[in-house]
């Protein structure tokens, strides 16, 4: 009888760890001007990508990223068995319309800004379970489509709070396969909803910090790992406000010494770019993973990475009704062989 794959309360260890064999990242003009601009595959000059609406632009952004990740591996669209993707828009509009064009069997996922980690976990489960040989996990976000849905159309020129974060225009995609070489997904911790009563939609970092700490703590406890086991623990998009709070929680719980922790929302932009508290959106952690982070793993500069994408599971309706913000974080352990 096979040993159970679940460890502790929330963590899964894969018997046949799936490999990340190819990846791609495409970012918008502002993201391309940031400190990691040269680490992304494509830096766009036009936020509309030649389309008539922001939503159509985001869908094309996702399509192009998937096609690029497959082409790097020499694959065609028909070589993929399942397409796992999501975005921030109502009814997963960008991912649904991208899937319509790509014509791959599709599982739409919603985890807000945690969607990249969620897609990797579901993809790893499918492969480890023997249901498929090859899947692609992806996500996207677009600054202008997200602002129109969650806050105010940018054309209105509404002043942003200093705690607000800039939704990243970007998309990341990863090809996952069985039995080949590449960084492997060794384990994953599925997060629980944590809500500490934060109701300010312009301060998502503060809302998400407690769930990031909770998931990272459970990952270490479930696998009995030392705090410094990983070369890098990186959260999705807490930004400067949330990252400062999560460091306090780490100190309280004895987790992750400071040199071993960073946040995609802080890294993706330069302080001079006037994004206030940093980056956010599904594309924030996706492009950082599929750009500089996996490149560092490929070069051997990182060998053990804990990727913890975080999401604020709010909607315009619940915000207008005065609801607090339930948050989620999923952790994916990626290790070189």
Image (cartoon, rainbow, N blue to C red):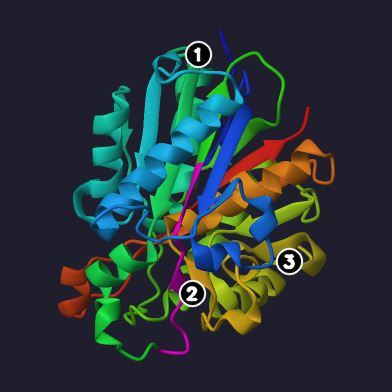
Q: Is residue 111 left or right of residue 120?
A: left
Q: Which residue is mark 2?
A: 205
Per the image, label 2 sits on a secondary structure element best described as helix
Residue 56 percent across, percent down from the top left? 26, 50
How crowded pointer 2 is (Cα within 10 Å; few <14, some 14-19, many 20+) is rated as many
Q: Which quadrant of the figure contains the C terminus? A: top right
Mark 3: few, some, or many residues within 10 Å (few <14, many ≥20)? Answer: few
For residue 35, say whether it is visible. yes
Q: Mark 3 near mark 2, Cβ–Cβ under 8 Å? A: no
**Which mark is on residue 133?**
1
Q: Quadrant of the N terminus?
A: top right
| Stretch in magenta | 161-172
Can residue 5 be seen from the camera position used here?
no
- The answer to which quarter of the image holds residue 17 is top right
Question: Which label's residue is closer to the chain start, 2 or 1?
Answer: 1
From the viewer's perspective, tell me whether residue 295 is left or right of residue 50. Answer: right
Q: In the rendered structure, does residue 122 fall within the stretch colored magenta?
A: no
What crowding class fits label 1: few (fewer than 14 Cα within 10 Å), some (14-19), or many (20 or more)? some
Residue pointed to by mark 3: 254
* 113 left or right, relative to 285: left
Contact between labelled residues 1 and 2, with CB atoms less than 8 Å apart:
no
């Amino acid at each position: 009888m096979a040993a159970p794959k679940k460890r502790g309360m929330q963590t899964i260890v894969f018997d046949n760890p799936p490999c990340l064999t190819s990846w791609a990242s495409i970012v918008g003009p502002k993201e391309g001007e940031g400190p990691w601009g040269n680490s992304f595959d494509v830096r766009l000059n036009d936020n509309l990508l030649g389309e008539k609406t922001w939503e159509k632009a985001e869908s094309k952004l996702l399509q192009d990223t998937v096609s690029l990740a497959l082409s790097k591996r020499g694959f065609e669209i028909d070589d993929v068995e399942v397409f796992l993707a999501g975005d921030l828009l109502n009814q997963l509009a960008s991912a649904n319309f991208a899937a319509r064009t790509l014509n791959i069997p599709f599982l739409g996922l919603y985890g807000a800004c945690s969607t990249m980690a969620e897609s990797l976990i579901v993809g790893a489960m499918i492969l480890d379970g023997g249901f498929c040989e090859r899947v692609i996990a992806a996500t996207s976000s677009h600054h202008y489509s997200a602002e129109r849905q969650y806050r105010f159309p940018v054309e209105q020129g509404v002043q942003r709070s200093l705690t607000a974060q800039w939704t990243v225009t970007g998309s990341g995609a990863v090809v996952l396969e069985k039995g080949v070489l590449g960084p492997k997904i060794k384990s994953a911790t599925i997060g629980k909803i944590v809500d500490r009563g934060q109701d300010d939609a312009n301060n998502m970092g503060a809302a998400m910090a407690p769930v990031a700490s909770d998931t990272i703590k459970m990952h270490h406890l479930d696998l009995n790992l030392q705090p410094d086991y990983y070369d890098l623990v990186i959260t999705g998009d807490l930004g400067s406000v949330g990252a400062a709070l999560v460091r306090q929680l780490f100190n309280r719980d004895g987790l992750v010494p400071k040199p071993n922790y960073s946040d995609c929302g802080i890294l993706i932009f330069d302080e001079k770019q006037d994004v206030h508290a940093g980056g956010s959106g599904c594309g924030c952690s996706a492009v950082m993973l599929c750009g500089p982070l996996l490149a560092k793993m490929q070069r051997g500069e990182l060998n053990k990475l804990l990727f913890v994408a975080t999401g604020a599971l709010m909607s315009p309706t619940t915000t207008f009704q005065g609801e607090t913000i339930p948050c989620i974080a999923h952790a994916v352990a990626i290790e070189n062989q």
